[in-house]
Amino acid sequence: MSTSTRNGLECRLGLGRIVLPTEAVDQFGEYRVGAKLPLNDRIGYAIGVWVDAPILSISLGQHPAEPSRLTNGALLVTGVAGIRCAFEIDEPLGLVSVTIGGATPTIPWRRTATLEDGRSVQFVDIPLLLRELLGAPAS
């Protein structure tokens, strides 16, 4: 199994923590989203508004079935002109360095990573996730 070291932004998500690659995050903020779109069961998607721009909101968490809700997230660098996406989180925690293990065959963009203090977290490979979702170029 190959490993690599990456810098990331540790975020709280539900009861756990995830790490997003720093180069994939433009900014953090609060925004409004509509009801979950019925695209698949693996990831939640909703149309949202960041400031005044429409976005596709990506979520790994469970949310009440409401027509509209406020959420927190990381506005992502997509690499595709005219398409903005955000990844829902509960709160950003800080910059970290992680050692990333191999990907699972069923969800290649979700990897187990180890923080410098030895804790395990999930690393979300945003460029790979966006390439799967949008056909965005890998960075």
Image (cartoon, helix red, strand yellow):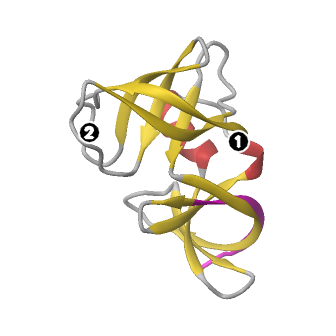
What residue does disc 2 label?
40
**Above or below: residue 65 compared with residue 55:** below
| Magenta stretch secondary structure, dominant | strand
SS at badge 2? loop
Residue 84 in the image: x percent, y percent?
A: 59, 23
Residue 86 in the image: x percent, y percent?
A: 55, 34
> Label 2 amino acid?
Asn
Relative to the observer, which residue lies in front, 51 or 118?
A: 51
Q: Split into 4 quadrants, where in the image is the N terminus?
A: bottom right
The quadrant in which residue 114 appears is bottom right
Count the marks.
2
- x 63%, y 43%: residue: 127
- x 42%, y 44%: residue: 59
- x 36%, y 51%: residue: 61
Q: Split into 4 quadrants, where in the image is the C terminus?
A: top right
Residue 21 horizontal side relative to residue 105, left or right: right
* Magenta part of the chain: 1-11
First reached walking from the N terminus: tag 1 or tag 2: 1
**Above or below: residue 12 compared with residue 74:** below
What residue does disc 1 label?
25
- The reply to whether the magenta stretch includes residue 88 is no
Residue at the extreme bottom of the image, as rendered? 118
- x 25%, y 24%: residue: 67
SS at badge 1? strand
Residue 138 horizontal side relative to residue 68, left or right: right
**Above or below: residue 104 compared with residue 92:** below
Residue 72 in the image: x percent, y percent?
A: 53, 41
> Label 1 amino acid?
Val
Relative to the observer, which residue lies in front, 68 or 47?
A: 68
